[in-house]
Amino acid sequence: MIFSWMHLAIMIFFLAGVIFATAPILASLLIAPKAKSPALFQPYECGMSPHGSAWVRFGINYYFYALLFLAFDVDVLYLFPVAVFYPQSTGFMPFFEIFIFVLILFAAIIYFWKKGVFTWPRRIKV
Amino acid sequence: MINLPLPLIQILIGLIGILAFVGLNGLVLVYLERKIAGHIQRRPGPFEVGPHGILQPLADAVKLVGKQLITPKGADSVLYWAAPIISFAPAIVCFLPLPFGPKLTNIDINVGLVLILAFTGLNVLALCLAGWSSQNKWSLLGAARDISQSVAYEIPLLLSVLPIMMLSGSLNLYEISTSQGAWPWQWHIIYQPLGFFIFFICILAETNRAPFDLPEAESELTAGFHTEYSGMGFGLFFLAEYSYMIVACAMASILFLGGFNGPIVSGWWWFLFKVYALLIVMIWLRWTYPRVRFDQLLNICWKWLIPLSLINLLVTALFIKL
């Protein structure tokens, strides 16, 4: 890969973003008060002392949505170069190819729909 | 006198302009949001600091810097402080490929659209880190919600952008702008009304705006993923959110509303006008609609938006061939 001005520009902009974000935090460290009290550093839990750690297990449904996303997003990325070239392509063949591709994508949604992922069940039958 | 190459000077000037634009826009949007919220609820909004409260956001910014930075006990302090920075830094990169006017582009990037989509995706990572590292149950729930929401709405967003690429045959945002004419009936929105509708709903969800602001739903999750952040940590998340709103509205105006093309004289004024009109619509929506339930939110996406955008894609592909 050739290193071009674009890559340099992206790096400079990202670095500038980091500096722009760090500066007010550093300024805050300089001028803000530094009070110390055990209650000040307690995680907020409606005013009570926290009940156990926050790093606990939570709903599996989120995981299923993430899986569904993975299946989709990778496939949609393949459509990007296709879409850019599409206006220059000739004949109806490219349309049918996209049609079949999208149909297979559609099948994924129908599969998960039938499995009942969208109803937020307590337990998903595999 | 050091001789800098011309593209480097161009990049640096663009960088300074964009940093100023982002900072100023944060202030303007905070003011607009509070003022519009006030008037929708039949109260004047901020009024005391300066004429009509115009200096209120500046005072708020100074106050935020002056607040103590608190890391909660038991939190992962490195990730905890990295999160707001990771959230904000990619927002600056997103401004790089935006064509503000016919001669007001930073550097010509032939994959500008993909660049913006890629760097806006990094925000999810930051919110995930923020929620996980702050050792707070509200934050964790907020982060879990944010990830499944952003991830779900990413797909109809990409699918509603694809027909625009088919129409203009390019990923270069400047070329996409110039492929549309000056008058509203020459813009892509005429060919893609459904696409614009889906895109707008998705950017509302991606930027965590009401009625889709479940990751930071204040009445159920305290403040969601940024519950524990004090002072500037919270300020940076706020600034990042507003920056992403501007990027999203700029994308909408470039892809669907003709970008800098406008009736009579095309230029950056039309671009800014469109961006701010969309931003005001976003703020207006926030104070008009109640929040949706979380399973409803995800099901709107999977049951309606994705099938509709797939059909939209196929119909567009068919029409281009006819």
Image (tube, grey):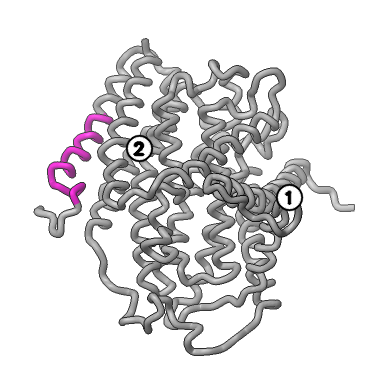
Amino acid on which disc 2 is placed: Val
Above or below: residue A44 compared with residue A64: below
Q: Which residues are magenta?
A: A101-119
Amino acid on which disc 1 is placed: Ile
Q: Which residue is mark 2?
A: A76
| Residue B68 x/y as whole percent | 60, 77
Q: Which residue is mark 1?
A: B16
Viewer-side residue, B121 vs B147 = B147
> Can residue B172 be seen?
no
- The answer to whether residue B223 is left or right of residue B88 is left
Specify few, some or many for label 1: CA neighbours under 10 Å numbering under 14, 14-19, or 20 or more: few
Q: Chain of mark 2?
A: A
| Residue A80 x/y as whole percent | 41, 33
Q: Residue at x 56, y 40 (%)?
A: B280
Main SS class of the magenta portion in the image: helix
Q: Residue at x 90, y 53 (%)?
A: B1
